[in-house]
Structures are given as C-alpha cells and as structure tokens.
Amino acid sequence: MRSSMRILAREHLALRAVARILAMEAALLARDGQADMDLLDTLARYITEYPNRIHHPKEENFLFHYMRLRAPARCADILDRLLSEHNKEHDAVTRFQNALAACRSGQPGATGELAQVAASYAKYLERHMDVENTQAFPLAIEVLQDADWDAIDAAFEANDDPLLGNTPAAPFQALHARIMALGAMPPGV
C-alpha cells in the first residue's frame, strides 16, 4: 500500500473517532441538555484546523488533481461531488462553531440547535469518508501511475495531523485521551 493511502487511512480513523465522539455529545445534548463543553470546544478547534486546512487541500491538490489528469471522464462525477462537499463543509463547521458559542452564552434554544448541528455534522463526516473510502480511493488505485503516486506520497508525508503523532499537539491531547478512553482505534494504527 502506498504511504499516502496509509496516511489517508490513519487520518480517516482519527476523523471517524472525532465524528463518533461528536455524535455521542450531540445525543447527550438532545437527551438532557448536558455535554462536555470543553470537549466540544476541542472538537470545534480540531475540525476547524485540520480537515479544511490540511486534509482536504492535500486530497484536492494532489490525489484528486492526479486523478483528473489521468482519467478525467472516469473521475469527474465522484471528484465533483467530493469537492462540492469539501466546499460545503466550511459552512457546516461555521454553523457548529456558532451553535457552540450560542450554547455557551446561554441563548434560548441554543442547546437543541447545537445538538442538531453537531449530529448533522457527524453524519456528514461519516458519509463523506465512506464515499471517499469506497469509491474515490479505489478509483485512484485503478487510474494513477507510479509517478503520480510518488508525487502524492511526498506531499502527504510532508503534512501532519495534530491528533496522529506519537505525542498529539497540546490542544488535542485531551481529545486523543478521550478517543483512547472510549476504546476507539488509536490514531496511527
């Protein structure tokens, strides 16, 4: 397996754990209006800093770029869909941040809104990764050539997820610990 595909698999494991924790916190909010607000703040910081600024650009500028070069007709539909979802994700993250801020400030109805927005984002993230994992990545394996993979591997190895390293970045150590405590697959495995 190419190093870029191993990196994507690890990153998706971490993102899937984030989505599941977010869904659990959303369910707690919906059930009794209580959730770990500090954890939600950390999740908001992570989804703001990592998927849209590092993970998606890496996919778009390298993997998707080379797929379009090698097989534009075969790849157009799936890549157009994924790019559209990436573009919409920024708005979803902003809605989550706004709902979290409203809840923190005690605005009426904000808890229910945060529960709905968090649950919706978690479902989106799971569904999006499923499409990438089951459709886009297998197609990449079919259409890309070794020279393409060499360039993609180099680009992917140059970026780092702050949740995946041997020592997670300071703001994300508590999130990493929560993932481990919940029995989620440890990032990097």
Image: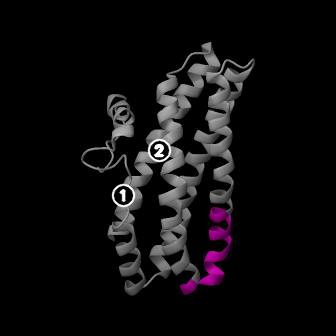
Does residue 185 lie above or below 101 as drawn?
below
Q: How far is disc 2 from disc 1 in space, using C-alphas?
A: 17 Å
| Image quadrant in which you'd find residue 97 | top right
Q: Amino acid at mark 2?
A: Arg
Helix, strand or loop: magenta stretch: helix
Residue lying at 66% horizontally and 76% vertically, measured from the top left: 76
- Neighbours of disc 2 within 10 Å: few (<14), some (14-19), many (20+): many
Where residue 175 appears, as percent x and y from the top left, is 39, 35
What amino acid is found at the position of numbered circle 1 in the picture? Asp
Dot placed on the residue nearer the N-terminal end, 2 or 1? 2
Labels 2 & 1 near each other (Cβ < 8 A): no
Looking at the figure, which quarter contains the N terminus? Answer: bottom left
Task: Tell whether position 70 is magenta.
Answer: yes
Is residue 67 depicted above or below 57 in this figure?
Answer: below
Q: Which mark is residue 16?
A: 2
Residue at left 39%, top 57%?
A: 9
Question: Which residue occupies 64% across, 20% down?
Answer: 30
**Residue segment shown in magenta:** 69-83
Which picture quadrant has residue 186?
Answer: top left
In the rendered structure, the answer to whether residue 71 lies left or right of residue 159 reads: right
Residue farthest toward the top in the current orientation of the protein: 32
Residue 1 seen in the figure: no
Q: Residue furthest front?
A: 105
Q: Residue at x 68, y 40 (%)?
A: 95
Which residue is the site of mark 1? 160
Q: Is residue 63 magenta?
A: no
Residue in front for this viewpoint, 56 or 5? 56
Instruction: Where is residue 36? Give x, y as percent.
Output: 49, 22
